[in-house]
Image (cartoon, helix red, strand yellow):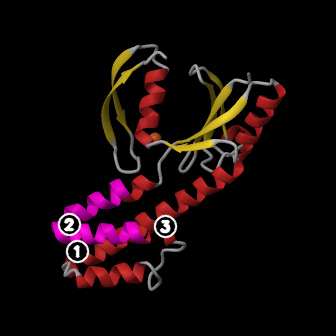
Amino acid sequence: MMKELVLGINYFGHDSAVSLVNMDGDVLYCLTEERFSNIKHDGAFPVMSINKIIDLIKHHALGDLKYIALNHDPELYVTDKLFSYIDSCCVREQSVLLKDSILAVLPEIRVCRQDMYPLNYLQELIIRLGIHKDISKDLLRYIKWSLNRYLYTQQTLTNITAMFPQCQVIPVAHHACHAASAFFCSGYSESAIMTIDGYGEHDTVTLGVGCRVRA
Ligand SMILES: [Fe+2]
């Protein structure tokens, strides 16, 4: 039986890279895009690294690619980041209605621009909810930023799913990726984990516990 493999893709920002891991957690290959593009800290989608990994899998008959793990989760830009912001600047009834409306339009969004649906609809809603104008301008700007970030990352997720139709594509929260890479490479069977990063979907610092579970 062919061994199942996991391809981890790190993109969106800087130092795009890929890693190939087997189901025992062994890292078989790790490639950075900058080595192929010759652009220092290249943050582009690592297509050259992915192609190289695919070649290596075939050439060495390493197994079947079954899972694609991504280094962030697009949904969290809305449900964690944006919704926390809304909670912080609206009273409960306003917050619930606005969040429900955003969740309702989310699957339909193709573009997020001023004076176009759904941003114009959400702008009207903010006025109707009586959110003070001192808050509403920044709130609308934040909604726009968050939805555009969601759109971009969600589109990439769709493209990756199309690239690997035979695989399950799993978005992983950014700090969970950092925690996992620190813990599983540490050699410890149990440990406390702290991640500190300038950027996640929402978090910048997390505390957790790592525990190896044997099947
Ligand atoms: Fe990071």
Alpha carbon separation for disc pair 3 and 2: 25 Å
Looking at the magenta stretch, what is its main secondary structure? helix
Q: Quadrant of the N terminus?
A: top right
Crowd tier of the residue under label 2, counting other residues whose Cα lies within 10 Å: few below 14, some 14–19, many 20 or above: some
Alpha carbon separation for disc pair 2 and 1: 7 Å
> Does dot 3 land on a helix, a strand or a loop?
helix
What residue is shown at x 54% (from left), y 61% (from top)?
152
What residue is shown at x 23% (from left), y 67% (from top)?
95
> Which numbered disc flags the more N-terminal residue, 1 or 3?
3
What residue is shown at x 71% (from left), y 41% (from top)?
50
Foreground residue among 163 and 183: 163
* Residue 135, label in figure: 1
Q: Amino acid at mark 2?
A: Cys
Q: Amino acid at mark 3?
A: Pro
> Does dot 1 land on a helix, a strand or a loop?
helix
> Which numbered disc flags the more N-terminal residue, 3 or 2?
2
Judge whether 81 appears above or below 24 on screen: below
Crowd tier of the residue under label 1, counting other residues whose Cα lies within 10 Å: few below 14, some 14–19, many 20 or above: few
Label 2 near label 3: C-beta < 8 Å? no
Assess whether residue 87 is covered by the magenta stretch: yes
Kindly identify which residue carries mark 2: 89
Kindly identify which residue carries mark 3: 107
